[in-house]
Amino acid sequence: MLVICLGLGGLVGVLTANRWMMLLAPVIFMTAFELARIPATGPTVDGVYLGSVYGIMALLVGRGVDLMVMGLPLAVGALWGAAGGRRRTGKGARSRLRTGRYLRALGAVLVTVPVVVLVAALLRPATTEPITGPDGEVLPQSVAELVTLQVGDHEQSMLLRGHDRGAPVLLFLEGGPGGTAIGAMRASGQRLEEDFVLAVWDQRGTGKSLPALEPTETLTVEQMISDTLEVTDYLRGRFGQERIYLVGSSWGSTLGVLATQQAPDKYHAFIGTGQMVDQQETDRRMYAETLDWAQRTGNEDFVGRLRDNGPPPYADMLAYPDALSTNPEHRDFPHGEDYNPASAYPASLLVPEYALIEQVRAMGGIIDTFSVLYPQLQDINFRRDVPRLEVPVFLVLGEYESPGRSDLAVEWFGQLEAPTKELVVFPQSGHTPHLDEPSRFHEFMSGTVLAGSDPSR
């Protein structure tokens, strides 16, 4: 798209021989582009909302990125095209001051440099480094790959890493909906690669799989379950294992439970971190927790905004972050000694496993995919609908998790029937124990989980 816009701008500049097209061409094109995508829905393409941080983020990662990859090349192409057109028509000869010509040439070069840099950055391919031994040589049985699969008639991406391709396979499901965990697990999941083949899948509409968001009518909970089982079958076939391990975080724990319930014969065990149970009830409780915190701290403006919004559920998806993501008591706590801040957004996107366009679009994927899938989660209630799972179940909660989440997880776990089950609480963790205390999580997975299930099945 960047090259097309550069060429289109150049053509317009040549035909008009007018330097003002440097400004007019991007305005005309971006206006036409906005009109063409009026039928599209989602926070990054809907009306602009500057009333919250997430509304501003939607603007920047949506239209801001569009302007960068389309508007800027159009402007530069039009500038150079106009220069060529003026020479062709003789208009350029009217300039009498040599200094003026030099200054214009210098200005053209200066505005071109960002486009050249952008093109070079966009051409950088996504890669993952090989796994090496103490001698620096690649481990002969290791696997370190970025793969693209056809899943549910859409191309979707996954990172595979492990010291031994014969080790048990662990499929990780990220939260959100809309999150991408490739960067987070590169920062905090490396110990898992020693004992498992770690498969980190970017679900439909997330991270490297962002283009699979469209058409949004196909983005349903049922389709996500089907995608999960299809990815599972790929891993089972590729690595010759009848069953694999399934780890889900937050929304990923919802998806993991539903996939395990539907096809227990594909999994050794299910492991939930930051386990979700009843989305609507959790949202109501977390809203009350956040409102209580705002009142205790005297944040009257925020209290007013929360009361104006009222308790969830919301029709406006941008209202959810106020209730669910603003309370600092859910994130400001003493993390484990090996906690890596690079595992958190947006730092987790700055890894070579993402190409530049995937890095800048990923946050938009979180917002748009959330807006499509989250309303579909409102009737999910595992206390009612999942009384039993036919595989060993392990739940990992954080001591600093929101009670609106953890209390429901404990309640569901207490009534759940499973071949074996175990619940642990990590003392220096919140909603993401696998990232807050990665070494403790590795020890739990390589010890408790492997011992409490039968990987030979």
Image: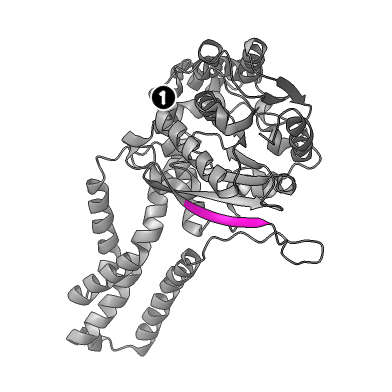
Using the image, determine if residue 453 lies above or below residue 215.
above
Quarter location, residue 112: bottom left
Q: Nearer the viewer, residue 114 or 384?
A: 384
Residue 338 x %, y %: 79, 42
- Circle 1 packing at 10 Å, graded few (<14), some (14-19), many (20+), is some
Instruction: Identify the residue shown where x is 39% and y is 36%.
Output: 49
Residue 280 x %, y %: 49, 17
Q: Which residue is mark 1?
A: 376
Residue 364 x %, y %: 45, 44
- Specify the segment rendered in magenta: 142-148
Quarter location, residue 372: top left
Q: Please give left or right for residue 11 compared with residue 257 in the image.
A: left
Residue 52 x %, y %: 47, 34
Q: Nearer the viewer, residue 250 or 316?
A: 250
Colour convention of the picture = one colour
Q: Where the C terminus falls, by quadrant?
A: top right
Magenta segment, prevailing SS (helix, strand or loop)? strand
Q: Please give left or right for residue 419 compared with residue 208 in the image.
A: right
Q: Nearer the viewer, residue 59 or 277?
A: 277
Disc 1 residue type? Answer: Gln
Using the image, determine if residue 127 lies above or below residue 382.
below
Query: Can residue 51 be spotted in the picture?
Result: no
Which element carries disc 1, helix, strand or loop?
helix
Query: Can residue 317 be spotted in the picture?
Result: yes
Quarter location, residue 400: top right
Q: Nearer the viewer, residue 59 or 142?
A: 142
Q: Where the N terminus falls, by quadrant?
A: bottom left
Using the image, determine if residue 388 lies above or below residue 324.
above
Q: Please give left or right for residue 97 compared with residue 179 in the image.
A: left
- Tell me if residue 136 is in the magenta stretch: no
